[in-house]
Amino acid sequence: MNASELLFLLDGLKWTIALSAIGFVFGAIGGLGVALARTSGLHPLERCMAGYIALFQGTPLLMQLFMVYYGLALIGLKLDAWQAVAIGFTLHASAFLGEIWRGSIQAIPRGQTEAAKALSLGYVARMRLVILPQALRISLPATIGFLVQLTKGTSLAAIVGFTELARAGTMVSNQIFKPLLVFGVVGALYFTICWPLSLYGTWLERRLAVAAR
């Protein structure tokens, strides 16, 4: 493998990181809305969000990307591959993060909410000052674990022709006919991203477990 082929893989790595970041950041914003809706006490809204989560948790990510790219085109909304996969990963992440954070919010002792109400804190202040900071702390290990899975899931973006790391590896492999070498490098690049995140998530989980004793 020469320098130009390695640079092509690194360019694919750049798009993998960018797609992971966009999907996670915008998915986190949407996921917060989903989590708040799921714990709002408004039953129609809670059922609607439960259906949204079930849809994305019950179907393969590959199919979701396929439906965003090709399904929207059928109704006249033609997106390029980058836009389609960014939307697909954002929707996917919002559903999973929303469920993670819903569980974290509901794990907060009920007395915390009652105490905040006794202090005449409104819903927004109660969530911002009392509930969400504690829920975020509880959810951090699972959130980081999901980010690792999301990063590895970017390899499925090739279904709509988006050139991220895995597809870049396939293209280089087809040119030089050395799949073991190429995908060994691709695997090493994924490892350099995901392994530190996994270690950080494990460290956080242990630290939070010690603090909770």
Image (cartoon, grey):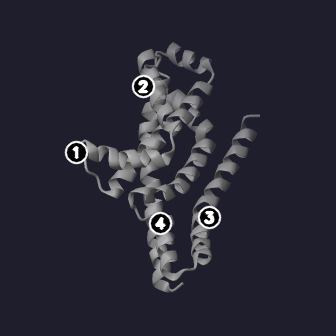
Residue plotted at (56% across, 15% down)? 114
Whether residue 166 is visible, yes or no, is yes
Compared with 127, 78 (above or below) is below
Q: Is mark 4 on a helix, strand or loop?
A: helix
Location of residue 144 in the rendering, given as x and y in whole percent from the top left corner? 58, 48
Amino acid carrying mark 4 in the image: Arg
Residue 198 location, quadrant:
bottom right
Residue plotted at (51% across, 82% down)? 176
Q: Mark 2 points at which residue?
A: 124
Residue plotted at (58% across, 75% down)? 179
Label 2 crowd bin: few (<14), some (14–19), many (20+), radius 10 Å:
few
Disc on the earlier residue, 3 or 2? 2
Q: Is the Cβ of the residue at disc 1 closer than 8 Å to that at disc 4?
A: no
Disc on the earlier residue, 2 or 4? 2
Amino acid carrying mark 2 in the image: Val
Location of residue 88 in the rendering, given as x and y in whole percent from the top left corner? 41, 47
Amino acid carrying mark 1 in the image: Gly
Q: Return the residue nearer the eye: 66 or 207.
A: 66
Label 3 crowd bin: few (<14), some (14–19), many (20+), radius 10 Å:
some
Q: Mark 1 points at which residue?
A: 76
Quarter of the figure that contains the N terminus: bottom right
Disc on the earlier residue, 2 or 1? 1
Q: Name the residue under label 4.
A: 167
* Residue mark closest to the camera, 4 vs 3: 4
* Left-right relation of 88 to 193: left
* Residue mark closest to the camera, 3 vs 2: 3
Amino acid carrying mark 3 in the image: Phe
Label 4 crowd bin: few (<14), some (14–19), many (20+), radius 10 Å:
many
